[in-house]
């Protein structure tokens, strides 16, 4: 991983191919909140006809109204947060295409 990931904030953009081969772009910001890293969702594809509630989309809203990835266990390393963001992006792409939030396709 890049040395910049040890800072308290960093951003990354990922391109994901969905199960139906649609290219989707995701942008994340990684922020440290106390000892825990949060994966903030800066940009993601439209959910189209899928429900957008926090449970189905595996998101949490912070006190400022910004969305971040819902993930347990808590993320104590930025490198782990980056891994989780990639899984979340794949899961979201699958959810948009199929209605199932699973990153394994």
Image (cartoon, rainbow, N blue to C red):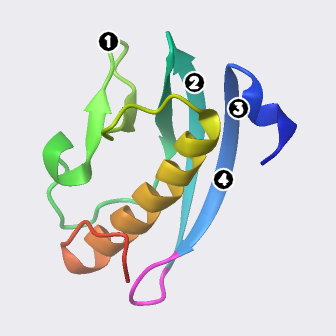
Label 4 crowd bin: few (<14), some (14–19), many (20+), radius 10 Å: some
Q: Position of residue 11 (x, y in %)?
A: 68, 38
Mark 2 Cα shell of 10 Å, populated few (<14), some (14-19), many (≥20): some
Residue 79 lies left or right of residue 3; in this view the side is left
Secondary structure under tag 1 reads loop
Q: Which residue is mark 2?
A: 31
Image height check: is 38 above or below 64? below
Q: Earlier in the sequence, mark 2 or mark 4?
A: 4
Secondary structure beneath label 2: strand
- Cα distance, mark 1 to mark 2? 14 Å
Report crowding for label 3: few under 14, some 14 to 19, many 20 or more residues within 10 A (C-alpha): some
Residue furthest out toward the right: 3
Residue at image mark 1: 63
Residue on which disc 4 sits: 13
| Location of residue 6 with respect to 23 vertically, above or below | above
In percent of the image, x 75 and y 28: which residue is there? 6
Cα separation, mark 2 vs mark 3, equals 7 Å
Q: What's the magenta region?
A: 17-22
Marks 1 and 4, the one that precedes in the sequence: 4
Residue underneath mark 3? 10
């Amino acid at each position: 991983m890049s040395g910049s990931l040890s800072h308290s904030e960093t951003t990354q953009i990922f391109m994901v191919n969905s199960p139906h081969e649609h290219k989707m772009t995701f942008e994340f910001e990684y922020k440290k909140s106390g000892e825990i890293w949060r994966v903030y969702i800066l940009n993601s594809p439209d959910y189209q006809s899928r429900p957008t509630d926090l449970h189905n989309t595996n998101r949490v809203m912070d006190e400022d109204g910004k969305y971040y990835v819902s993930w347990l266990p808590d993320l104590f390393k930025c490198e782990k947060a980056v891994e989780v963001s990639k899984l979340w992006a794949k899961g979201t792409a699958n959810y948009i295409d199929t209605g199932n939030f699973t990153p394994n396709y």
